[in-house]
Amino acid sequence: MRILIFVLLLLLSLTNCGTYLLLASQENEHDHSFSDFIRLTLIDSSIGLVHYWPLDGNTRDVIGGLDLTDVSGTPTLTFDRFGFPEKAYYYDGSGPYHESIAQGPLFLDGTVSSFTVSAWVNGKWPPGANGGQSIFLSQDGGLGLQFYALSSISCTGRLRAFTNNSGGQGDADVSSQCGAFSENTWYHMVFVWDIQNLTASLYVNNVLVSSGKFGSNRPWNVYSTFALGFSPLGTFLYQGSIDEVRVYNRAIFPVSSL
């Protein structure tokens, strides 16, 4: 039975259907880990999913209808993390990006709901950046996921998720250590806001890299469109690929934290 379920998951994942949110950090570690994995991937990952962009040749939101359009040119289709062509989008850092016509989800302001943002990314860190560049996913200036670099402290190789309030001051800010990650590698980034505990957490490839309590300066400035490959906070646009973007209206944690 276990083999049958594993084969089913493998086939579905190879077709890039997006049936799972988070992968276990180690395979075959314990029996209960496998059962948790099955529960999370086949049941939990569909609960609270309100926006889903597979990015499989188009920019349709197949769940919430918040479709994205080309801005300043057309991002190009590229290979996804499995090596399948035209199953992800590449942003060249020179201008083209994707943005919704309609306003993005307001619950991302951090005041009324927990939420989870999940994306697969493969990008570059900008040289000589000021810390506000290369934001690959954003909603207005209030929410961002980023390939972070800051030349003044010789920091690069850092993955970051953050929020800003309407006054421009940082609220939640969680990131890896400098130099923790490499360019041109696919990473699964998951940013979780747990409103019950006022806790923000960042997971990379199912591993918790940063978490903290943040409770002031809300609401965040998210009263605008949702974008991939761009943020109004930065001028150095993201250079890299994005795939399988999901937004949930609840907190979802990796298997390893259950």
Image: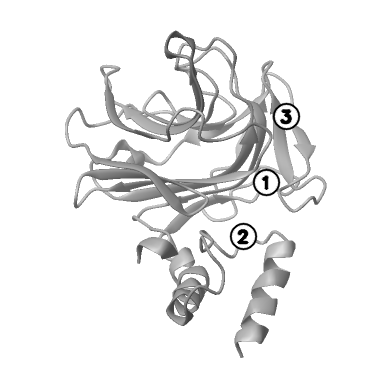
Residue found 58% across the figure and 44% down from its top:
187
Mark 1 — residue?
A: 55
Mark 2 — residue?
A: 18
- Pick whichever, 144 or 187, lies toward us: 187
Give residue 12's quadrant in the image: bottom right
Q: Is residue 160 left or right of residue 134?
A: left
Inspect this view and state whether residue 222 appears. Answer: no
The earlier-in-sequence mark between 3 and 1 is 1
Q: Position of residue 224 (x, y in %)?
A: 42, 28
Q: Is residue 119 above or below residue 27?
A: above
Q: Is residue 165 left or right of residue 75?
A: left
Mark 3 — residue?
A: 75
Inspect this view and state whether residue 27 appears. Answer: yes
Residue 226: mark? none
Give the CA separation, mark 1 to mark 2.
10 Å
Q: Residues within 10 Å of mark 3 (few under 14, many from 20)?
A: some
Q: Is residue 157 left or right of residue 220?
A: right
Q: Position of residue 77 (x, y in %)?
A: 78, 38
Residue found 40% across the figure and 60% down from its top:
48
Identify which amino acid the numbered label 2 is placed on: Gly
* Residues under numbered marks 2 and 3 in contact, where contact means CB atoms less than 8 Å apart: no
- Pick whichever, 226 or 185, lies toward us: 185
- Pick whichever, 17 or 67, lies toward us: 17
